[in-house]
Image: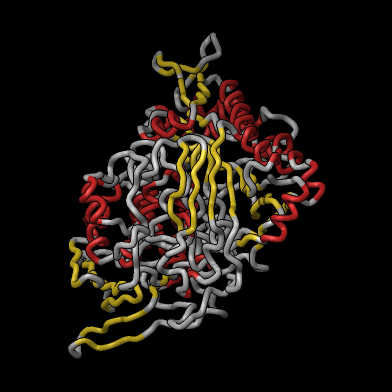
Amino acid sequence: MRKIQDQYQAQARTKTVHARNTRWGLGILGLIITFALASFVRADGHETIVSSHGYSFYGDLKYPEDFPHFDYVNPDAPKGGEISLGTVGTFDSMHPYTRKGRAGALSSSIYESLLGEGVNGTSAPADVYGEYYGLLAERLEYDEGKNWVTFYMRPEARFSDGSPVTAHDIAFSHNLLLDEGLKSYADAVRKRIPKVEVLDDHTIKFYFTEGISRRSLIDQVGFVPAWSKKWYEETGARLDESRLEISPGSGPYVVDTVDVNRRIVYKRNPDYWAADLPFNVGRNNFDSIRIEYFGDAEAAFQAFLAGEFTYRTENDSKKWATGYDAPKVRSGAIVKTELPDGSPPTPSGIVFNLGSEVLKDKRVREAISLAYNFEWTNASLQYGLFQQRASFTQDTPLMATGLPEGAELAFLETLGDVVPADMLTTEARMPHTSNEERLFDRRNARKAMALLDEAGWLVGDDGIRRKDGKVLELNYLFNSSSADTLSGAMENFVSNVQKLGIDITFEKVDSSQYTSRERDRDYDLVYDAYAPFLGTGTGLMQRYGSEAAEFSLFNPAGLASPMVDAIIEASLNAETREAEEASLTALDRALRYEFIMIPVWYKPTHWVAHYDMYEYPETIPPYALGQLDFWWYNEEKAAALKASGALR
């Protein structure tokens, strides 16, 4: 379901692909991988058929067929208790697979797919990249050329209402996404997957289009969420409508209570069909997961300190530096800690709408970017806690550096004239540096003004820039529920832009308006994010490619670059990890060259605060923090907190 969910939760773009050191992001893990691909058999003496309990593109799997549990979990973790989280904003739907409405947090997590994943689309297993293991499916078969795949489903799989999960449900879900799902998703899938065939109640076969890359085909269909065909037919519900009533899922949790804009509670299904599968041992440990909604970030923070919810991942540097000087933290009732994050940082920043006529000129984008002062922002507002992000694959082996050389240069040269000559002769784009002592860096301002003059935007007597009588106007759309520190940083940026003679409006709107306007791309600038990448796949085309650039929710800049398209297409056809690695490094270089956003900051660890009743494995896997997945509840510690009055 990871592929599908990624399409439908643009507002929850989190780190769904992860890695940091050496070659982890490419799934090599040379010292620890066991080549556990099951069996290769000859069919009719001609075609080689692969039969396995899991799938990776190159055929290597860390976990053998008889694995007892994932290495990083505690197989003896107790079941019980509650974990509660706070979130800012509103929701009016529990159906996350439509453009309409704003879906409640974790509303997609009650559904499962043929291949398994972590909570809310995170990785499972979380210690390897690009490996997928059967959940609803106990095994799969595919031909050596990956022209088709057959999934053999577990007959014991059940929806939460007790009805069986069958191949008919999978086929129904696949077709429903094509008929009533997002156009960008449906268009892409129809080109690649022309046919699905139900062979019997528990066997389903997908066929793939000839002459296209074999990437992201088997895993694409393997992550189709399983929806109940019976429920949809009986209720007449549609996938493209917003609603609070949802179809039953087959996952470990079910919806318990929904109080719109206030609270959602999920409870662990005591009859969960897959509770004892090795895939789930040591996972899904909480009896309930509660989500509390708040109107703004400060209200949420104060509610956490008061004990209204019990777990918080902190993203506000000011709060992390100063806000936790509170009695419960000093007493140890609240634990404040940094945990390792093995993922590349989310490529977030100030995104340019390339559909805006003014912003089509890269010189204008360059000039606007020079108004952002990372050094002053980090020192003055963020307590020096961040580093400046440059890359879409920051701090991984795929990050482009210096001039292109070696395999990357050879790859770029094969693409011909689609690659601008100056990209081959200049170093990979790096963010500008600014004066830490002054918010308005005069040296950068002079460069910016020169670029605007060169682009024909000249300053009038009133200090405003015009071209052919038209004022240089920009609209910056911003979510008013964002943290105060982020809001302050962006207000300072806007102030600097105005000093360049640009008439820019910083428009703060509530979460609902923000979601609606972002979907319609009603902005010139927006604070948003793309997804990092550590492997190639068709998702790259949907995020960064031209095929859905005009309307894709996952390409907020509307990037449509022939060079980027060519790189992605070539990457999809890479036959070795080395070729894949070279192409993805080139992609990072190209995206930075196209300059679709002003990168801001990142941190290499998770900032976590929680009431001292949760425990987790000694070693956190690199690709998931796992607080909703493989953490657990200590009943004795919880009782002590309640006895002390720290929790009600």
Visible residue check, residue 640: yes
x then y, percent, for residue 269: 45, 60
Q: Which of 342 and 109 is in front in this view?
A: 109
Give the image quarter of residue 497.
top right
Name the foreground residue: 300 vs 600: 300
Quarter location, residue 78: bottom right
Q: In this view, does 227 lie above or below 448?
A: below
640 sits to left or right of 182:
right
Q: Residue 14, percent across and down?
A: 50, 50
**Snapshot quadrant of residue 339:** bottom right
- Give me the residue at 56% from left, 59% from top: 286
Above or below, comparing residue 105 to residue 203 in the picture: above
Percent across and percent down for residue 616 are 64, 63
Picture quarter with the C terminus: top right
- Where is residue 403 shown, x and y percent of the image? 53, 56
The residue closer to the viewer here, 301 or 258, is 258
Q: Which residue is drawn at 37% across and 28% down?
A: 357
Of the 4 image quadrants, the one containing the N terminus is bottom left
